[in-house]
Amino acid sequence: MNINSLVRENILKLQPYISFRDHNEFNTPTFLDANENPFGECNRYPDSTQKTLKNKLADLKNVSPKQIAVGNGSDELIDLIIKIFCEPKKDSILMMNPSFAMYGFYATINENKVLQINLDENFEIVKDDFLKITQENLPKVFFLCSPNNPTGNSTEDIEFYLQNFNGIVVVDEAYIEFSGKKSSLELLDQYPNLIVLQTFSKAWGIAGARVGMAYASEEIIKLINTVKAPYNVNVLSQELILNSLNENKLEENVNKILVERAWLQDQLKTIDCIEKVFPTDANFFLIKMKDVNKVYEKMLVQEILTSRRDPAISGCIRINIGNRQENEKLINLLQNVI
Ligand code: PMP
């Protein structure tokens, strides 16, 4: 597949921002090049190429640093991907329904049509529907969220979508670490139209730093680096993430959530006001309530904030897994809904 033929013409003409400082090695540099203030604690701009961070991530994920773009959260990367490939007022994106709202949010801001493929009763994509909608509308980018937010399930057979989509397939793996499933990163060399999104916001527990990654071919990464704001990931966030990578507590973090997930799942089975707990590969449950209004209102009274999905997903609330104290508070409340 020729990726350049998918890129907006004006973007193809752009050159990436090059900071002389970030692209050269110095021994004892005197920085008088960026109109910074010589005094102060955080007075220097961040490394616009996020070199140290990318080298670490490259080792961890077994890819080249040139196959990594780092964003101000994966949210920013979703926005940039749409900007690179989708001509305003002309092109469309495809997403699952229900799925993560930000794909539609950024596409709409960029004046792109948002095509939705309705998931079946098990929250799976119907392949025939996928083929029909893609062949009829030729969307430029397909956002495949796996595990999917808010349904919690993973998509099998991702290669089918890569092989049958004449555009860019973004596999959003924000929750992959909780799933025990294989990442699509290993498909990168095989599929030039694949972009994998991951984030430090969920399993790593560093949502406040706003750091997400796109992994793709060098060609696509170059395009993302061309359109991103030069200093999109700040100094403090880069340092915080590097510390976390060095501490290497991912497995410990994930295990803590998995223990809580199992505990919560057991407890939820005993609750009367629940109609169904959908299976999850993520750090949240989608739960269908017998009377969603009653449950949601009770939660609000006790200031337990959850994500109401009704009416879009009838009767459902998405609830993420908290610490034991929070989970107990939730279960207590649910036990007392009559
Ligand atoms: N993708 C999915 C599926 C998400 O649920 C979220 C956050 N809710 C994101 C991306 C955004 O993550 P980040 O914090 O990296 O912007």
Image: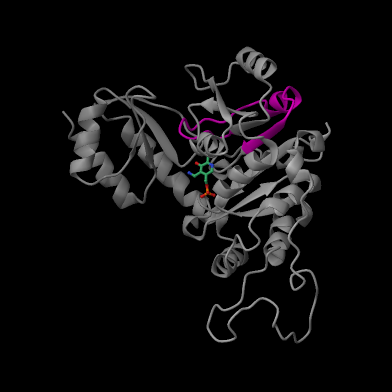
Query: Which is more toward the observer, 247 or 305?
Result: 305
Asked whether 49 falls inside the magenta stretch, the response is no
Residue segment shown in magenta: 145-171
Asked whether 162 falls inside the magenta stretch, the response is yes
Please indicate whether residue 325 sits to the left or right of residue 178 in the image.
Answer: left
Determine the image quadrant of residue 51. bottom right
Name the residue: 55% across, 47% down: 75
Name the residue: 69% across, 53% down: 69
Q: Position of residue 25 (x, y in %)?
A: 80, 76
Q: Is residue 205 above or below residue 140?
A: below
Q: Quadrant of the N terminus?
A: top right
Q: Is residue 135 above or below residue 318?
A: above
Q: Position of residue 201 (x, y in %)?
A: 51, 52
Q: Is residue 294 above or below residue 304?
A: above
Please indicate whether residue 290 sits to the left or right of residue 253 in the image.
Answer: left
Determine the image quadrant of residue 316. top left
Q: Position of residue 324 (x, y in %)?
A: 33, 50
Name the residue: 81% across, 38% down: 4
Q: Quadrant of the C terminus?
A: top left
Q: Is residue 229 above or below residue 117?
A: below
Instruction: Specify the farthest residue to the right.
Output: 2
Q: Position of residue 154 (x, y in %)?
A: 56, 31
Query: Which is more toward the observer, 137 or 178?
Result: 137
